[in-house]
Amino acid sequence: MSLDVFVVSAANVPKERFGKSDPYVQIVFQGQKKKTEVIKDEENPTWNQRLDFDLGGQALQPSDQLVVNLFDYEKIGRNKLLGTCNVPMGNLSQGKDSLEVSPGLTDSNQRPLQGVTVTLKIHYKAPPGAVKKQSSGTVGSQPGMDETDADEEQIEDIEEEEEEEVEQVPGQPGKTRKKKKTHKRRKIRGKLSSKPQDFQIRIKVIEGRQIQGSNIKPVCRVTVNHQTKQTRIKKGTNSPFWNQVFFYNFHTSPADLFDEIIDFQVFDSKRLRSDSLIGSFKMDIGIVHDERGHTFQHKWLLLGDPEDPMAGAKGYLKVSATVLGPGDVAPDFKPAVQDDSEDMEANLLRPAGVTLRPATFSVRLYGAEDVPRMDSAMMQGVKKFFGVGTVQKELVDPYATVSFAGKEVKSKIMYQCDHPEWNQELRLGLRFPSMCERIRLQVLDWDRITEDDTIATSFVKIPEISGLGENGFLPTFGPTHINFYGSPREYSELPDEYEALNMGKGEGVAYRGRALVEIKTVIGELPDQVIDDIHNDDVLRVQKFLRRRKYKLHAAFLSATMVSEVDAPVEFEVSIGNYGNKLDESVPPCSSTTQPTNPVFDGCHYYFLPWGETKPCTVIDCHWEDISFRLEAVNLINSIIDKLEVNVAKVRVAEQSRLEAPQIAQVIISTLDELAADLSKPFPQVIEGQHQSNDLDRLISEYRQQEISNLKDEVLRLRENATVIVDAISEIEGFLASLKTLAVEPQNSMPDVIIWMLSGNDRIAYYRIPAADVLFSATPDYCGRNCGKLQTITMKYPGNKAEKENKPEIPAMVRAKIWLGLDKHEHEWHEMQTEGELSVFAETYENQVSMIGNWTNRAPMGRPKWSDNSGKVKLTKEKFNPPPGWRWEAEWYISPELSMLYDKDAGHKEFLEDVYEHALRVPGMAWHQFPQKPWSDVKGDEMPARDDIELPEGWKWDDAWQVDLNRAVDEEGWEYAVEATLGGYGPVEKTYHMCRRRRWLRQRSVLLTAKKKVEKEKSAKDAQEGWEYAILFNQKFHAKEHRIDLCRRRRWHRKMVADSPSATCFFQMQDDDKDSDDEDKYKAALTAPRMFLTYPGAHKYQLRAYIYQARDLIAGDDTGLSDPFARVSFLTQSQQTEKLKKTLCPMWDQTLLFEEIEIHGDPRVIVQQPPPLVIELFDHDRLGSDEFLGRTMGHPIVKLDPADPRLPRLAWYEIKTKKNEYGGELLAAFELYKFPEEVFDPIEEPLTGKDLPFLPPNRDGVFIVPNGIRPVMQRTGIEVLAWGVRNMKKFQLANVTSPSLEFEVSGQVMKTNKIKNTKRNPNFDEPLLFYDIMLPKEELYMPPLNIKIRDHRQFGRQPTVGIAVLKSLESFRADLSKLDTDNIPLSLLTAGMDTAVTPVNGADHVIDMAVEEDETGTLKKVLKKKDIIAEDIDWWSKYYASTGELDKCRHYIEKGFDVMQFYKTELEKGEDDFNSFSDFCQTFPLMRGSADEEESDVIGEFKGSFKVYPLPGDPNLPLPTKILSSLPESGPEQCIVRVYVIKAIDLQPNDPSGLADPYIQVELGKKKKDNRDDYVPNSLSPVFGSIFELEATLPVEKDLSIKIKDYDFLSSDDTIGETTIDLENRYLTKYRATCGLPQSYSTGGIFQWRDSQKPKEILEDFCKKNSIDGPHFYGNNGVKIANRVFNLGDFEKSKTLLPDAGPPEERLALYVLHNLPLVKEHLETRPLYNPLQPGIEQGKIQMWVDVFPKSMGPPGPPVEITPRKAKCYELRCIIWNTKDVILDEESITGEAMSDIYVKGWIAGVNDKQKTDVHYRSLDGEGNFNWRMVFPFDYMPAEQCIVHKKKEHFWSLDETEQRIPPKFVVQIWDNDKFSADDFLGTLEVNLDSLPVPVKKSRQCNLQQLPDVDVDNKVKTISLFEAKRAYGYLPCFGTAEDGTRTLTGKVEIELEILTKEEAGQRPAGQGQEEPNMNPHLDPPKRPETSFLWFTSPWKTLKFIIWRNYKWYFIGGFILILLILLIILFIYSFPGEAMTKIFSK
């Protein structure tokens, strides 16, 4: 088991009302429910019980949860849920293997139960072969690293290697064992279907986190298989929230679709396209489909740069994805809720802790061989004609491409070369680990003009060439060859009809070459050069892997039957690779084909090849690399698997046979012992010098040996410790699954063996056999499973030919032995042929032509006189010389082909002999007999007169000669023509007619036994000359010469024997014919001999096929019925059963005798491997061919001794249609008797079978199934309730108004009365019928029941208008011993109940005055609780509380209000097991139409039921009481129907925008209502909240249809999807599904009672319908039902009543009803479907329906479910200041500064506001005092903003978005002459706002919750706190993606309602009204100004402040200069004045 849950104990179990509880625990995991035993009257029970859960090979995911339910077992009503809890499995999925928990429980309303716990011990063990998932959720999807790099790369193991681990022993609590664990490889995807079908892929893009970039506008684009859709653009955020769903629809095959890519790309919409990609993530579609439920739920994707993997993570993207096929249930994508504290790493879609690193796939492409021709030879023929270019060129120009994860690299082109040597290394860059799984290698042919042709395609699967875990390894491959398969190799100028096979779509039918490839993975680097030449040293290194060894492929064909191609001789070709390909001229000839043989009729329908005692053999010499060590390992594992499958089947048979446990255990122990012994066998080893192994061989070998060792330990452990049979079987099946994963060899370079059926030169059918299956080894355990063994091969048509050309038949069935081995082991093949002698013959054909009536061998139409079968090779007898080592044993002799010895009547039991009488006349004369040829056959060849025709031996005439008048002839049978040789016969005689003829017929029947016939054929063979004739050599030959034949031939053989066992048997022929027209006079040619396996004689057998009946066949006629018959084919004979008319469940009861079947070979081998029978079923058609219905196969029991007492047992064989789908079942048995040897008398008497068992009884000339084999019958009663018919469609353009029904069981028919008028009442007046019939006693043989509906029309016509088939009546079988309790549910529930809980005679005590006091006290209690209903409590609170969305219902749960039962499916399929409300009657669809139609035609419905039970064997005994009685009234009932539609989920988009405009249309009968005027625009998950009320008449208008339609403005509205509800079933069911019962009874308020009946009335009706005594009410708070009394106080001990609670007796009645199996108040989720995509869900709808019969009174008021309306709020944000803002610019003076302003908006609303600019901030401080005002609509109960806007200006409607209340603040630097610079951002959720700090120094990035997941940040709700003030940090993103603090904002946020905002007005910025609070202009420094608007301030604060000292210094300097100048200027004058003055 994969998950063991040990339920230890529980504590403080709540008591029930009348004592202690009877607890038990139910564990629910992945849909599996298991429970413990019940412990009576215990508050602290102890179970110590183990519950096992099989994970089905899948490992745990982190999102998995274990649901623990604690129940109180009740005998009255349903078991009560005491508590529940969820236990997450995250710890186990992350590596832990055991867990012990004691979780606390909550009640059904999610309220915690104090002290109530359940103790569990959980042990997780991955099943063998399964891959344990990491916490990331990856399902074995990533390859691991090389073990040397494992620690360095920090890749965690998928399963860690541990020395020892403690594990609990299954079934033995407390006992442990030690177990080793190993690493695992990834799960390998199995073979996928190539059949196209509908798929829908849904991708939900939820949100992004930590998207790199600053001030980006992210948009996500999702591309799936070339279809692209994108989300909305989110502005200015690194954490966008999209929450959008995309739908992708495809019609293709899984094989094509699952390899396509899902590409997630996140772009910055602001940038140019070349620079817009931020990050991407790619994965295969198959990765999603491989998940449980084909779904990923809420996974985080790690985004990276595809061009630069070293750049690290570019962000995270949260998505959900699902892949839906027909019939898949669409998952409910959980509502997306933003949680900033979510652990992304734990749910990341990659192995936890792994960093995506750059890597390179290096694909070394050395060369290829055997590439087929692809081009026309026309140009070469032209050049040859003109003598230009004598060199023969190869007509193909190959090149190769390697593709992975959407990337492709192409090699160079090798022109005109079929063996290219590229020697190139192709490199693909990727991010590792990758989510893609296959490397595609494709070889193409280059064409100069047209598009390149695909030669072939092959895939290398990454999981097969890599390993995970500690000892894992990187993808590595080769060097080794990869084989290519595709369409047939033969070149044709016409288009290749199988071209799709060359592209890897479907199974290739022919070998198309191979390529030598090597793959390596390099981690840590990307390729600098994608293509490079391989170094010569590396080319030489791989030469050792090219060593070839000689192999021999032998095949012996024992029989070829069911041959469908009869127009030309048939032969079989065996090939391996290109060796043995007959039609490829480049391949030397070899004995690869059987001799061409004309098929012979088998007596019924098919043909066979009459090989007789000489079975053709083939032998092929081929040369391949010796990879036996690989294939032998696979064969060893396959042999273990085969044995284990046989043993598991034996165990299953023993279990189904209900053997005793010890006997089954003995079978299991024997199986385990044999398995342990098989696992001990050694694996083959690589032999040095013989084998060449590579790295992958070594790694796979180590992996296999380790896994086998671990499996052996597990087997031995299971043998010792197994205690539970079911668990042991499950573990054994796990071992089988593990072995199958080991039996995969990725490096199988030996091509498959391919067998082709050829007809002439056409390839008809094929079969592929893996070479390993037929490979011989000297060690027996290493031999292939079919090596040298007799196997039956069913040939297949290539490609989709069978489906396209409507060919349901089998092309041929071949029984053959095939052996492949080394040349040195060939003697082993010869030694195996102990049953016959291998003979070798030289073969040549003598050819002659007819010239002037004489046969001559001169110039026989271009053929040599002596040639091979094809006439292409000249082979004269004289030129044959035995090859070296061989000698002649006899002379040449004529050996006619065996089919020539069969007469035209061969195989026929009856034959129609015909002959034509001819007459002629001369114009004007009478008719007279034709003189030259009075009698002839249809071809004009002369025949004897009709009376001279001899009766063949062994035949008798059935009648006299008669003229054939069933043709276009006159009254005497003559037909006329002008000239007999011209034809053109007509039935009317004209005067110009010169010839006439008439046809005579005579029937003859066979008398000759097969033995005498063989003697006759043998004598004829000896007598004739062996010639076979044909018109031309290339046409089909026949034994009898015709007049128009122009050529003939005969075959000559000469036997050879080998003197040397190793000598080759090929002839080297030398043509020295001087007269040869060939330019080469001496031409050497190889020719191959014929080989046969000659048997000494055949054994005679008799087959008895017991065909009893069939059931559930498909319809072949338009009536919906068939005229079936079965055709049974066995070897060379086939027969068919009687044709039964108009039935789908035919009972033939017929034995088919196959007399004197010849089977060659040892009878003991036949016992072990009996030939299969093929049973085909057909619908007989009078006109045209019979229609194929299906096919099945079986094997007979072989009895070598006729006295063998074993009897065959009838068994059901599943029938498969031509599309390989279910087509019914056939009940049959078969036995094969061998005639005793003494019966063989070749002359005296034929086989009579006198010693065989007596023939079965004969009935009307037909043998029936004998007693002992046919089922044992018993007298049985069948009660039929034919309630009525519904929804009948027209038949033959007329309404079906008066139908009646016919019921047929085992040939007995009963009819109902007809319905007078279905439009008034479609029910039958007398609905009950009764069968007293003999039916099989065993359940297995219970016959089907056929239902026909006939319409009674005028003139007595009663056409069959529809049918229905019940496959078996076993499901309706009733147990009469439990009949009484079944019909009285409450009595059943109270059986054995303790009636002393409340005394019955305590009624007086119950109704005393205490009642009034209790009632008064209760009333007072209610009055005190009038205020418990808050304003925000509405019906939607009840809805969200019921669906589990507790964040949207506030305190509803804590207050203990009512909740509804929420069903995730339809109500009728809910978990309460309502059985689709079919307890009263079931609905059976009535069908009409052929199965070939695309959709079956359902023409109506039948409503009814059946009860089957045994009757007394003595007819004199009275019959038991009828079960079906007390039926309700069948008349019409008027009803009021209310339809409540809440919402739709994940609708299919219908608009080009990827959205829809949905609205609802409700249809009931002819009444329609819709809310088209209130459609929801642009939504895929609309909330409707709509009520529709209609009136209807049941059952006339029973089907309620709810459609979701898409509103279109111009065109007609499209239907998105619809669902239909059968209201009649809800009305008639015992579960009372008309109106659900709420949890409480209220007379008003939001919980007001709405049913038309009150609880007391409902309880009375229930008791009356079920014949229960009661109810008897005692006062207002006591009631007695049957033998139990209920008190109101027991139900309302701790319950708080609403102020409008109803009367006590009504409340009490409701509490009692809740304990009964009735439908409670509910909400159902119904899937929507569209006929255009049948079977694929188009979305879901949440709703419920109430049905109120008018006869029960008017209903209460409807429930108010109008959707919630958002309230108007106003957000006021005051930006006071900023601090520490980074300075982004420099002034002209070199100062760091910023011109700061702040921008703010509500995310999603995008009404951006900004402050004024604080210029020239020099220290990062900005002062603003600026108010921003943002009005918005907010829904408090759901905590989201409701924003409506038009997506585009041309949009008609506004789109409503519900977005989280996020507020964005950004700091910017203002620039006047360029774009402003972004400095930092802050994004906060107003509902979880980080608490601002009061001081700026305390402000840092740790305040934000999404910076560090482990950092617990204190948050508040601004809607509750109303106001917040303080500092919050702003950040920017560095180049490396890290966040840096770029500023701090002093901010004040305030939330006001619309009313509060009106009372406290405030303006934006500092505008009026500037109040609340008043904002003064900021006191900014004087340095804050704009320089060019304030020149004075510029001078003062910029120039003067920075340069004042320069100015002062300059001024002083100028003064000094002036003084100096003045001094200098004035000094001379003054000096002179002074001088002269003196």
Image (cartoon, rainbow, N blue to C red):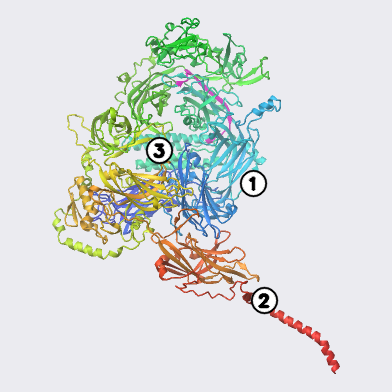
Classed neighbour count for the residue bearing mark 2: other residues with Cα under 10 Å, few (<14), some (14–19), many (≥20): some
The residue under the point 81% across, 85% down is 2025
The residue carrying mark 2 is 2003
The residue carrying mark 1 is 529
Q: Are marks 1 and 2 in contact (CB under 8 Å)?
A: no
Classed neighbour count for the residue bearing mark 1: other residues with Cα under 10 Å, few (<14), some (14–19), many (≥20): few
Q: Secondary structure at mark 1?
A: loop
The residue carrying mark 3 is 672
Q: Secondary structure at mark 2?
A: helix
Residue 335 placement, left or right of 1148: right
> Which stretch did the figure color magenta?
607-630
Quadrant of the image for the N terminus? top left
State how far apart marks 2 and 3 are (Cα): 99 Å
State how far apart marks 1 and 2 are (Cα): 60 Å
Classed neighbour count for the residue bearing mark 3: other residues with Cα under 10 Å, few (<14), some (14–19), many (≥20): many
Residue 1612 placement, left or right of 478: left
Name the residue type under label 3: Leu
Choose top left, top right, bottom left or bottom right for residue 1220. Answer: top left
Labelled disc at residue 1621: none
Residue 69 placement, left or right of 226: left
Choose top left, top right, bottom left or bottom right for residue 1624. Answer: top left
Does the magenta-highlighted stretch encompass residue 1405?
no
User: In the image, residue 782 lies at what x, y percent?
Assistant: 50, 33
